[in-house]
Each structure stands twice: as C-alpha cells, then as structure tokens.
Amino acid sequence: MVRVEIIRPEPNDAVATGTFLRQLRKNRLGVLGALLVVLVFVSAFFAPLIITHDPIKIMVGPRLAPPSLDFLLGTDQLGRDTFSRVIMGGRIPLLVAFASLGSALAVGVVLGLIAGFGPRWLDNLLLLVFDTIRSFPGIIFALAIIALVGPSLASIIFVIAMTSVPIYARVLRTQAQGLLSSEYIAAERSMGAGTARILGVHVLPNVIGPLLILVSMDVPAVIAWEAGLSFLGMGVRPPTPDWGAVLNDGYSYINQTPWLVIGSGIPIVLATLGFTFLGEALRDIFDPKLRKDL
Amino acid sequence: MRRDDLIQHTSAPPLLEIRDLSLDFGTPRGRVRALRNVSLDVPAAQVVGIVGESGSGKSTLAYTVMGLLSENADVTSGSILFEGKDLLKIPARARRSLLGDRLSMVFQDPMTALNPVRTIENQMIDIQHHGQGSRSEKRARAVDMLHRVGIPDPKNRLGAYPHQFSGGMRQRVCIAMALLVKPALLVADEPTTALDATLEVQIIHLLKDLQTEIGCSILFVSHHLGAVAELCDRVAVMYAGEVVEQGAVRDIFHNPAHPYTRALLECDPGRIKKSTRTLPTIPGEVPSLLGSTKGCIFRTRCPQAFNRCVQEDPVEYRIGVDQVARCHLLGDERLVPA
Amino acid sequence: MWLYLLKRTVLAVAIVAIAVTLLFLMIHAVPGDPAITLLGPRASPEMIAQIHQQMGLDKPLAVQLAIFFGRVFHGDLGFDAFSQRPVREIVLEQLPYTIELIFVSILWAVVIAVPLGCYSAIRRNSLVDQVAGVVTVAAIAIPSFVVAVYALLIFAVTLRWLPAIGAGSGFRDGLIYLILPAFATGIGWVGYISRLVRASMLEVLGENHVRMARSFGISEWRIVARYALPLAILPTVTILGVGIAWLLSSAVFIEVVFARPGIGKLIVDAVNTRNYPIVMGVVLVTTFLIVVATTLSDLVNAFLDPRTREKL
C-alpha cells in the first residue's frame, strides 16, 4: 500500500485539490472505487432515461426469461424487466444512505457536543446509553423496531440512523474533549470567548472532516443494511423496485433461473465495493490515523 | 588514505574495523545521506565511545554494525570487518548467527526493550539459543548473571515480567542479557540516556566492571561526555553523519583539534567551571542531509570557517600519535592551537 | 481481580438494564394497548387481562417498569399465545443452532485469518500481501446475504455439491449442512481479522523489544510466534467479543437464506407474523448474549496480557 502524507485540505484551494487528486490517482483501488461510485450515482440519477421498460409494469415479457436483447437481464416471475428494476432499484439505497447518515450525523454531533461539554454525570449517562445501543444486536434490534412500527422506508432510515448515532457522537465527544484541553482553546477562553464561539469557530470545523470520512465509510454498510432488510421483506413495499427486493425474488425462484439473483446481486456488490474502496482511499489520504474505535 | 598509516599500538588487527562506510535513508523527499565515509576501529578489549548531538548518526552507526537498520536504509559504500569477516558481504544467515553470540547490544530505552508478555526467564533462556546445555543450565547462568548486575534475589525475580521491574533494574536486566552471551563486542546505544543521574553512574560502573571481567570490547554510543570520559579508552566525535575527530579519550578531551569537538566540550555542563545564568550552546542547527553535500559539513556553524571549507571536503589529518580530525585548519601548519 | 470483575459485571448489568428499559419504553411508545403489543393480535381476552394485571397498567409507569424488570429478572420473557408455550423455552430451543453457526464461522475465520494477517505483515508489499489487501476489503464490503445467495446458487443449485436448506441431523450431516452457512457468515471475518492482525502485527514488529530480540539473532519465525503474536492478537480478542453482535446480524440473513433453524430465522418469522413476545424475547436474549461475550472477551484480553493480568 502506498503511504501518504497527511494533508489538511482547504476548500477553494486549487493547490490542495490538486494534491488530493494526485494522491487519489496513486491509489488505484481508490480510483476504481470512485469510478464505481460515479457509476452508481449516474445510473440512479438518470435511471428514468436508462431503463428500457416500465420497472413496475407486469408481463412486459415472458416470466423468468433469460437475458436477451430486449430484456438485458431477463425478466422476473411477474414478467417485469429485471434490468429496469435493477437500475431504478439503486435509487432507494442511496436515498436511505443519505437520509439515515445525514440525520445520524446531525443528532450525533448534537449529542456528542452535549456529552463533550455538558456536566460530567450527563457525559457518563450518554456514554452508557451509547454503549448500550452499540451492544444491541444490529439487525435483530432493527427487526424489533420494524415489528413495532411496521415495515417501511422510514422505519429503515430511523433504525439505521439510531444505530449510527452513538458512533458519531462518541467520535465527536472524544475529539471535542481533546480540543477543549488544548492550549489554543484555553487561550481563546481567557480572552473571553463564549462557548458558542468556541464551538462554532474552533471545534466544529476541526472535527467535521474526520466525521465526514467516517460517514463515507459507513455508506457501504448502510447500503448492505437496506438491501438486507428489503431482502427479508422488511423494507420498501412491492412493487417498488429495489436491489434487496429483486434479490429476494431471485432467491425465491433460484431453482428456476439464476438470472434474477445474478442481476440483483451484482449492483449490490459493485456499490458496496465502490463505496468501500473510495472511503478507505479518502481515509488513507486525509486521516490515516482515524479509527472507529475511539 | 591517511587512515592506513595510522599505526595501531597493538600488533593484532582491531576487533571491528569500519572502513569508509556510507549509508543513505530513502525518504519520500529524497535520499538522506545519514552516514558519510565513516571509518572507525574498535580494538579488542577496549571501550570506544561515539559522541555527538542528536541526529549525528551515532545510533545509525551502531545499528549498522548490528544489521538492525530499517528497510529504507541503503549502505552505498564501505565495509565493516568484524573478526576478519565483512559483515556487509557475508550471507544474512551467517550474520545472524553472529548476533547474540559474538555481538550483542544494549538499547537506549529499557522501558520498551524487553518483551512485555514473556517472563525475564524465558527471554534470558531464548537469547542463549547459540549456547549448549539444558534449559536448567541456561537458567542457572541467567540467575548468575542477574546476580552479577545487581538484581536482588535473582532466583525469585527470574519468573517476573518486565513491567514488575523499575527502569534502572530493567536496564540491568538488558545488560545482563547482552553480556550473558559472552560477546566479543557489546554495542551500547545510549544505555543511560533514559535513566536519572544516580542510576547513570551505577550503570556506567557496572559496564566498566563487567567489561574488565569478561574482556569484551564495547562500542559505547552516548551524547554524555562525562559518561564517555569515565568509561571509554577511545572516542570518536560524530557530526551530521561524519566522524570529525577521533583518538584516545585523554587526547580528545585535553587537546581537541576539531572546532566542533571544542564547541561540544565547551557546552558540556559537567565541564563548565564558571557559574553562568545561561548554558552555552552551539549556534545554528544540524544541516539537512538531503541530497549531496559539498565542503565541510560543519562550516555553517563553525566560527573559524573560511573559503576552503565551502569548496572542498576536508580529509583526515593526524594530530599526535593516535588522534585524527577532519578540518582544513589542520592542513595549514597547525592554525589550531594544539 | 475481584474489583475488576465486579466493575465489569456492574457495567454489564447496567447495559442490560438500560436495554430492558428501552424495550419497555418502546412497547409503551407504540400507540394502542401495551398488552396487545406485548402479546400480539392473536391474544385471547383472558390473557390480555392477565397481562394487564401483571404489568399493573393502572399503576404509574415507574411501577410498571419495576414489574417488567422483575419478570425479566426471573427469566420470564412472556408467553407465546400462538404456540401456547413460554417465550423463554422457544428462544432457548433455537439458540444452540445459532451459537453453533457463529462458533464454527468464527473458528474457521480465525484459523485462516490469523496466519494470513501474520504473513501479510511479515512479507509486507509482497504479492500475497497486495492480493490479500484487495480481497480482504472486498470480503468485508460484500454483504453476507449476497455471499450466501451466490454460494447457494453455485454450490447447491448449480453444482449440487452441498445441501441447500436445513440443518441436517446427526453430527456428520450437521457439519455438511454447516459448510455453506459458515462460509457465508465467516468470510467477512476472514477479511476483518486478517487486516486487524496485519495492522497490529506491523505495529508490534516495529517495537523496540522485537529489535532487541533480533539483536540476539533469534530466528524470525520464533520472534513472530513467541514475541509478536501474543501482543498482536490482543486487539483481535477484543474485537471478537464485539463481533458476536455483528455475527448475530449476519446469522439472521444466513439462517433465512439456508432455511436453518436458529434465533435469526425465529425473529424474522416472528416479525412477519407480528408475534411481539417472541421478537422481544429474542432481542433480550441476544442483548444479554452480546454483553456476556464482550465482558468475557475483555476479561480474556486482560488475562492474556501480563501487564493487566495482575490488576485483575
């Protein structure tokens, strides 16, 4: 692996951006990851232009047909075009990733700041709650919540956000406490700066970078969760196209045709691999010391 | 080469002969020329000190002798003759078989030098892998050696882990281990730097006593001039990867020839006689060793630098019977008061 | 020793207590009768009345919580109205299958990953290291259920080498039925553990005591096996405890894909049939399992390191 030096990128700085691109280019897996991520985004964004058939219209072709020129990945058990379903199906994982990680980041930052700056008892209590949520058995906990509130896209987003919050909050708390004990914050304090100013001007800009890298490294896991829950039938309702749901169809008819499984599994693999490679490259370039287990 | 006509007073060849050794470290910013044309002898049963500031390459030299350099190190020229064999040319296997047998080493930081998850007993038996004898014989030797370095109740302490010893005791254990294998040459890389002053004196005396007893040579790396004066027979002064002066301890300390040696001696707190509010320092910094260098390496900080120092590399000049220094001043009819 | 154990136990109990509280609050946060939430829609009126009385729904929330705690503390996880059996019995009946799957998965993952990680660290930047670097990231990234479905497609449906579904009967048969599920569950862990071992091995090999061992000419493999590995393995031991949580998540999918009995399959079926007592029972049992596993792995870790052993 290429060892890279730590650089602190500044936005709108052509030199820093150039360095970043040069370092990314040296990291071949990172480039592959970036290409895959672009592919996933482009296909999801322009999905309506790419699809060859209406993804939810049944019997546009024969049932469980193998790939052909008309049906690039064959058809499913209801005669729907698998290719169109798979292309449209990329939208939901991305939506879930953005919504869940975005809200987790927001809540995590707030809770992390409360833990980092609040009174000691509150800090300890929050840490205990974070640790509790982290020791919940991931998918099993998610299934419990879905059992209570019913399967839907919102439930999935809520569950993923809830399990991600403790990680971000912990990282932010640790970083904020490290900064707080640093000398320049003490100097700023002594000059009469309020907590709000210290938070806004000094703490947040310093911690948001590493946090965003952590978030980017969580994207593949979220895509896997979403696909997994949909695979179990706990996600989007049919007939909405979704990778996990198509994979489940394929699993149900695995004895009749391999094409549904192949066609829906590959985009999941490509997306998770792409985001993982890109996330690792970003971490290596910007923050080689970053660890999740803070 | 002038080195060759420097007559040794002992007829036997020295135990360790370093000749014209140069070494680079590959870094992302280019090659750092960490050692340049280093030549040094360690005669049998003598203690040779290497002194210099941090970054002078003295530890690098010690590690080169032991063959423990990091992967990015690259020896570009020279030879290290040990008991007649060139350590840089013999196969890795043959070289490793010398380690822990003819050669051993004491490291700078006793707190991290011992393995934290193995008992002292296991580590002391492991290092005797060249030696013959049963495990219990090796254990008995270990107990004996611990006793000689002054570990109280060594029989019971043998089963302890390193963290159950204090820093000074750990360094005693390290010395016991290094001498347990009865080496011909002990390389000691700043063995007292991490210890406080009282302990330092004790460790120096211990090394001196055991050296006389075992009859080995010691290559003693230190930045502490007092320790060197106390322990060593000969001394080499290193600056920025070069040996700028070497000779008998008495000559170097009483009659330093190189401006750097003199500056170093003036800065030694142990030798300052007048009381001052500020400790003297050598102005300037050790120059970067990136890329090739031309001229005398010390010229940027030398109070007596002149044109020639910029243009050509100084060669070694002999002062007296057993003292050499690299300085242009010495070439011009002893401009340096001797 | 006892103080440390006590501290860990208190923490573990606190975490389980908070988990129970959160579950209780969740049940009450759902609109409608908590008794129905707890018993499921198939509950008979008598049972609802019984739960009402048990939970003391007329009493304040705090008292209800205390009663709920009391029941959980006595191992009473509720009653499954559907099968007319205690939830505890049903969960404990399925648990061995899942534990067997997790144990075998971890075992083969560790057996492969630790040597691989060591080799990658010792021969850094060798071909093996570089290939392993890419393959292990991929193994971590690709979701286990995708691996499972593909493995099912290739080895069971197409090649027909291995059985597709179920758990088999008898020891030999059971092992054959375990091959594909354990492969799919463990493959990500091969990647994860080997990367972890590689990283910590590289760190340890750079430490001073390793250099000292080398300075005595001790052979490289002995240094790795006796000096470096006991230290480099410590983070892996810690992670294995936390990893139980992840493995339980994978096991849910794997059990569904291979139609294996186990608590994963149990909870998915329970969610599909709105069988809340079973769902809650599985959550409680697995949370308890995870807390025990992490506490145990911390203790094992502390025991393996002589520096912390004496503080135990």
Image (cartoon, rainbow, N blue to C red):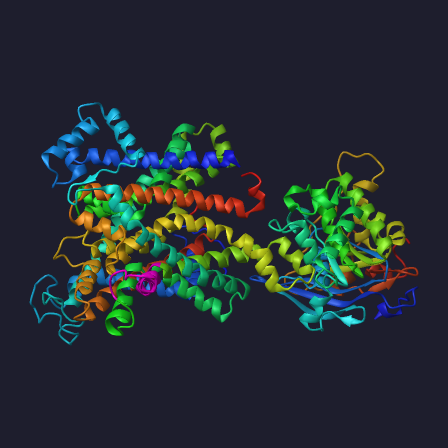
* Residue B237 image point, x, y percent: 79, 55
Reply yes or no: does residue C182 show up in magenta.
Answer: yes
- What residue is drawn where x is 42% and y is 48%? C241
In the current view of this chain or complex, which residue is farthest to the top? C59
Does the rendering let one see residue B228?
Answer: yes
- Magenta stretch? C164-185
Nearest the viewer among A10 and C158 is C158
Residue B219 falls left or right of residue C51:
right
Nearest the viewer among B288 and A136 is A136
Residue B253 falls left or right of residue A124:
right
Residue B47 falls left or right of residue A228:
right
Does the rendering let one see residue A159?
Answer: no
Nearest the viewer among A178 and C195 is C195
* Residue B239 image point, x, y percent: 74, 56
Q: Quadrant of residue C134?
A: bottom left
Q: Is residue A106 above or below residue B36?
A: above
* Residue B312 image point, x, y percent: 76, 65
Question: How many dots with numbers?
Answer: 0
Reply yes or no: does residue B263 show up in magenta.
Answer: no
- What residue is drawn where x is 75% and y is 70%? B79
In the current view of this chain or complex, which residue is farthest to the front? C170
In the current view of this chain or complex, which residue is farthest to the bottom? A69
**Secondary structure that dominates the magenta span:** helix
Residue A134 falls left or right of residue A81:
right
Q: Is residue C272 above or below residue C123?
A: above
* Residue B222 image point, x, y percent: 76, 51
Q: Quadrant of residue C31?
A: top left
